Image (cartoon, grey):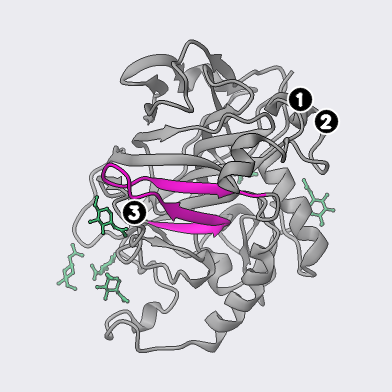
Amino acid sequence: MHRHHTILVGMVAALALTVNATTCNSTNPCPASAPCCSEFGFCGSDDFCLGGCNPLASKSLDSCMPAPMCQDATHTFADNSRILTKAAFFDGNASAYDFVVDKGTIMNTNSSGGELALLLTKDNGGTRISSTRHVHYGTITARLKTGRWGGVVTAFITMSGIKDEVDWEFPGSTVTEGQSNFFWQGVIPDGHNNGETHKGISDTFANYHDYTIDWQPDALTFGIDGKTVRTVRASDTTDGGVVKYPTTPARVQLSIWPAGIESSPPGTVEWAGGMINWDDPDYKAAGQFYTLVKSISIKCADPTKAGKNITSYVYGGNSTKDTPSVAFSNQTTLLNGALSVGPAGTTVNAGVALAIAVSLLATLTIL
Ligand SMILES: *[C@@H]1O[C@H](CO)[C@@H](O)[C@H](O)[C@H]1NC(C)=O
Ligand SMILES: *[C@@H]1O[C@H](CO)[C@@H](O)[C@H](O)[C@H]1NC(C)=O
Ligand SMILES: *[C@@H]1O[C@H](CO)[C@@H](O)[C@H](O)[C@H]1NC(C)=O
Ligand SMILES: *[C@@H]1O[C@H](CO)[C@@H](O)[C@H](O)[C@H]1NC(C)=O
Ligand SMILES: *[C@@H]1O[C@H](CO)[C@@H](O)[C@H](O)[C@H]1NC(C)=O
Ligand SMILES: *[C@@H]1O[C@H](CO)[C@@H](O)[C@H](O)[C@H]1NC(C)=O
């Protein structure tokens, strides 16, 4: 009944075609020469070690850069100045940008105080933004308008380095439903069905709604316009003695992506409402499909209070069965950490430049 993890599978497959690099997973972690396993399962250094880096598939649990810690915020989009348009240029400074564009194209409609538009065209393969900070439990609300086109999926999710994931997804063939879902370390255990459909939302394309992911250590709650529509208790996710519940620091991601295309598995195409019609009048008129984001608010709920000088999260040995521990740290999140006391913008690092070149190539085909 349950679809496989289409977003990730699609990204990895696309990347494998174009980048000849060492692949990694938890049974084949990265070597010391390229210690970080990127979100797409390739070994590298520098920006491979930033957001999305998988500690369990990297050289060691501390190979990935410490993840910038959560900060309460309401992000609005009067302009896009807080969004870095190329994730590959990100240096880990979460004070400089709230989001990075992993792939695709953004716009600002500048109507009624500003709206962020994420675009999908036949050529760009969709758009995804990720928060620069991680959330280690918290309440996240996205106020957005979805697409309304079969095969086009709008998504608002949280995703950790080890692929603990919580989703709101909107297949575009209907504008009155949303789907909630969650994954533990990239999987939904056999026999479990973590996905649920929530009906009766008033036109999700025409109207802004608030979609909430309230992720707490003991329970995960999904809400629409302030009303709870689903609660999952962590204890309900126990499978073979392991609590298969998201527990690791995650980035907030919003995306519009093409599920109804030739390269998608048939089940994914069907789930998304069929093949995309690139002759759709909306597409012809606008030159693109899009989703509009009015605001994203984040209320952190770290299970313990951060002490002085804390800046980041790091992974440690397993705390409970098959679940890595997460701790606060005061280590820098910057790739050029050693230079972090110097004035901004005065350094160029050859390693970073190389990594940027590599990931620009990678960026062409992700998602
Ligand atoms: C891990 O990577 C190795 C080498 O690429 C591959 O043979 C193996 O199937 C992968 N394991 C998983 C679980 O994907
Ligand atoms: C990080 O970004 C902030 C805001 O742009 C800036 O003030 C600060 O100097 C930057 N830090 C470093 C180390 O570049
Ligand atoms: C956005 O709209 C306001 C008026 O509503 C205008 O003053 C401003 O220049 C516009 N900004 C951009 C970037 O177009
Ligand atoms: C925080 O940083 C300051 C300045 O580096 C240092 O003096 C202080 O001891 C640190 N506090 C803690 C609790 O680590
Ligand atoms: C960072 O934390 C370590 C202990 O974890 C402490 O010894 C050190 O003083 C801290 N540094 C700062 C600048 O707070
Ligand atoms: C720790 O958990 C991971 C899964 O997150 C598992 O693969 C690994 O075997 C565990 N290690 C130990 C020592 O239990």
Amino acid on which disc 2 is placed: Pro
Q: Please report the bounds of the magenta region as a residue range.
A: 99-121
Secondary structure category for the residue under label 1 = helix
Q: Which residue is mark 1?
A: 270
Q: Which residue is mark 3?
A: 69
Disc number for residue 154: none
In whole angstroms, how far apart are the C-alphas of marks 1 and 2?
6 Å
Q: Report x, y in % for residue 248.
A: 47, 43
Left or right relative to 310: residue 172:
right
Residue under the point 51% across and 46% down: 160
Q: Which residue is mark 2?
A: 266
| Among numbered discs 1 and 3, the one appearing first in the sequence | 3
Q: Nearer the viewer, residue 279 or 75?
A: 279
In whole angstroms, how far apart are the C-alphas of marks 1 and 3?
38 Å
| Among numbered discs 3 and 2, the one appearing first in the sequence | 3
Viewer-nearest of labels 1 and 3?
1
